[in-house]
Image (cartoon, grey):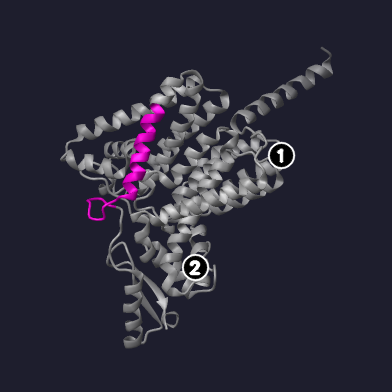
Amino acid sequence: MSVPDAETAGPTARRGRRAAIGEAVFPVAAPSRARPLPRAAAYLAAFLAGIAYLVLIPAGRSHLFRVWAEDGKEWLSDAARDVPLSHLFDPLGGYFHAVPRVLAQAVVTVLPVDLWAVGMAVGAAAVRVGCALLVFHVARGHVPSSVARFAIAASVVLLPTGNSDTVNNAANLHWFLFFALCWTMLWRPRTRAGSAGAILFTAAAGLSVPLGLVLSPLAIARIVLLPRWRDKTSGLVLLVTAGAVLAVAIGADRPRAEVDAGALALSAATRSTLVMLIGPQAAGDLIVASGGRLWPIVAATAAAMLVVLGLAGAAFALGRPPERVLLAGLVLLGALCGVASLAVNWQDFLAVHDELRTPRYSTLPALLLFAALVVSLVVIARRRRPVAIAAGALVGILVVGGAAWQLADDPQAPGSPVVDGITWEDALDDARTDCREIGHENVKVAILPHDGWTAVLPCDLLD
């Protein structure tokens, strides 16, 4: 080898290794063979079906008549009283809420005040279903099987843990936005339009989720490993938005109790695996039936972890490099998000010793670990089809059972996610009476989840 050849061999080899790693982490999907018109029709049908499901299940339907928490107290109140989108970059709780604020502004601008509850519920459902369809589209490079991608995308809508206190309200859209953001960070678009869409979604989601910093290693990997600037840009956008959220979080004063490490670990493991497999209702019933004894909860959680980690471990051993990268990322992200989301919000009631409260903290880790299960079954099926069929049947029965429970949910059952309390119609009637009798410029309008939560609206809007 000549001296010039020796000098160029090193950089060339490094570029080759970098390209190989880039292909493993960010594989490019093969071109779709579906024709544009039928594909668009299928996406539209899935979009409408997903929204219909979320607004027709008992828990979702109850939100059509009520306004939930920050949806009224923050997003609708600000949109109704001030210049449109003037609060777009106002943080709350240590992070930004761009998507909920834009949704509320659209509702206030387009709909009469009496329909704001319906608008927020349907709008939140639409954003969530949109996240599911985005996952189906962008995951094709890592999950070529359309059946597997459908299962992962459908979990955003059907997984029982996502249809408790997170259903049909904008205050909890960040769980689903983060899940879609994970897959978008792994996506390597084939077209400029796809790259532009990825950048726009990354900006919107990055300014709406509290845990964007967790994805910074993926963002850095995009910048380092991918050759085209249009692929790097979404990584740069995520780093900028995550940095802005970090700056806000450092200065935020979030109420939090002293963390009990043991209680935190058990709560995170239970919420991430057991709740994912059997749903929050069944997990809550098991915890209550344990009567304060830890061993039944620990045993059930250990069994759930064995299912998840056992299948993921077997698939990791059998999988190809891109599949191994994906599996490791999903499992690690699921564990990290499960612990981090609890730790930064820790209160004693988040422990699972006596009951399962605020199941929303199960949503994101459950989605990530369910995706890992689906990918694991696809990988195992290539080598051990009977094992994959048996495991897939078990997981399918659990998830379908959970979805069936959501359709037949008894509002009177303990732990039911069906919300009760003052309706938006009744609250507006009370507010209109106050406006006439007191004559203030603004009036408080009662909202859920309990007494003390109110939206503040101009009386002029209620005439």
Q: Residue 151: which numbered mark, if any?
A: none
Residue 352 screen position, x and y as percent: 25, 42
Judging by the rendered image, the residue that carries numbered circle 2 is 107
Q: CA distance from mark 1 to mark 2?
A: 39 Å
| Quarter of the rendering occupied by the C terminus | bottom left
- Where disc 1 sits, the SS reads loop
Which residue does the numbered mark 1 point to in the structure image?
228
Where residue 256 sits: x, y (%)? Answer: 32, 51
Q: Quadrant of residue 418?
A: bottom left
Q: Residue at x 83, y 19 (%)?
A: 4
Give x and y (percent) for residue 68.
Answer: 37, 62
Is residue 202 in view from this perspective? no
Q: Which residue is nearer to you in this view: 394 or 426?
A: 394
- Secondary structure beneath label 2: helix
Above-or-below relation of 259 to 88: above
Residue depth check, mark 1 versus mark 2: number of the one nearer the observer: 2
What range is drawn magenta here?
Answer: 391-416
Main SS category, magenta section = helix
